[in-house]
Amino acid sequence: MSLIADEIVRFSSVLKIAYNFLTGRAYLKRKKFREKQKLVSVPLPFSDLPFAAGTVPVFPIRMHNFKINQYLTYLGTASNIFGWKGVSNFLSFVKNLGISEVSKIVDDIIEDVIREINEKYNEMYDIGIEGGISSDFCYGLKSLVGMNLSKSRNVDAYMNVTIRCSAFNKYLESLSAINNEPRPIWIDIPPRNIGNALELLTDNVSHALSDFEQLTGNTISDNMLRNHFNISNQVKRAYNTIIYDISASDFYPCNPATFSEIMSLLNITFIDYNSNATRYRDNMNSLVNEMRERIRKHIGMDVSDMPRIFVTPIFGGWEPKTHDYIYELGGRALYADWGLLKLLEELPISPSNNPVEEYARFLLNATQTGIGCDNDKLTDSYLRMAKELNADGVVFIQLFGCHSISNCYRMLRDKVRKELEIPITAITFNKIGENIEQVKTRIGAFMEMF
Ligand code: SF4
């Protein structure tokens, strides 16, 4: 892991994003109690309306106390004085001195961030199981139940956007049984491409906005929606640049294991933008700039001979060691779930567009062409993404308990072999750390094909 730490500390934006993720609890407490803002729980990247409405979206795990390496705490304090760029320069300088004890401290910081997030996910999973969720549910849902059992008392509303997964929709319905204090704000997405789907969904988005108005007591204007869409478009642009331009290129600004680590951090933090859209936008923009600057100076790694392995889906849970094994065996793991699901599409913000309808169109497009209404559409999305990434192979994560998207593997395997003519394999997943040996063996056999 020291190689990973060595690289990550050179990206001040990554330190900031990790720090903002881990210190969410203090930030959210301040928002709720001092600034009297409303907190809205979001389980997937549907934070646009909460932000536009002037509330604070939160992926509930961030209300937990994370054990933060004491040095990261010092760095956070130091960043108030010197800025994160100064902190990153200082850390790079320290690493370059080659003093092993000091160097180890920096390694420990990054290791702690990654380990702590994974352990917290597993802790949520255990709370979910203890709380009585059936063991038949997937890792993601068990963890979400754990997050809500432990923290829903702090939120004022649930942002409930239905998706094609019936288990997920049942989970949304069960939230009121866990805690009926927060107001459920529903956006029901018509599941099929029926004639008036857009009209129905536009209506549903309007209702959700009325619920937000009742929650805050403030009116939401079209301009408030457009202003937030403008910020989220910039986040998406930066994210797309990292996925399509940088991760698919032949020269990386860091080693591929570090790159995958950054991509998995973005995968989690994109859900609620660490509860602050402008701060997240700025961090994403500086991440792109830092990456480009390193590539321009030819600092990083030539990865032209390393096969691109598209690992997906990871949003419901996966073994994070997967990318380490792929890297150790000469490949590079690419993560791009949100692009695959069409959640990185920009929203039109021209005054001539109706922003409510545009948001409905965005949700409909994600439902019908991203995750798809059926396995045929969904597998086409995987195929499209693999093509766009120019992938040399696909590792499909089959979640225990997922009857909605994991069961398309056979269809996907046939399509990938026939249409892309590249290798594909599946790895089963139940809980982080539980199946490491099998992941290692499976990846080992898979990587021999390259
Ligand atoms: S992993 Fe499968 S079961 Fe779990 S929420 Fe996603 S689609 Fe539903």
Image: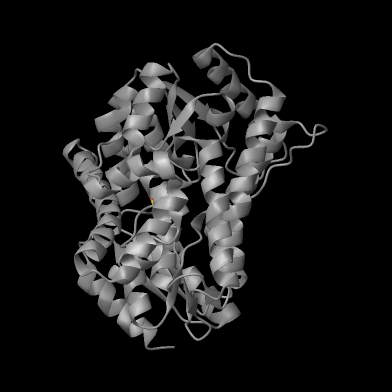
Horizontally, residue 442 falls left or right of residue 308, namely left
| Residue 347 % position (x, y) | 69, 42
In this rendering, the answer to whether 149 lies above or below 292 is: above
Decide: is 21 above or below 52: below
Q: Nearer the viewer, residue 317 or 85?
A: 85
Quadrant where the C terminus sits is bottom left
Determine the residue positioned at 44% across, 54% down. Answer: 12
Residue 4's image quarter?
Answer: bottom left
Figure disc tally = 0
Report the side of 242 relative to 398 (left or right).
right
**Could you say where residue 148 lies in the image, as x and y percent from the top left?**
30, 32
Drawn side of residue 154 relative to residue 200, left or right: left
Question: Which x, y percent locates residue 1?
Answer: 28, 68
Which one is in front, 225 or 373?
Answer: 225
Residue 190: name its quadrant: top right
Quadrant in the rendering for residue 327: bottom left
- The outermost residue toward the right is 352
| Residue 349 visible at all | yes
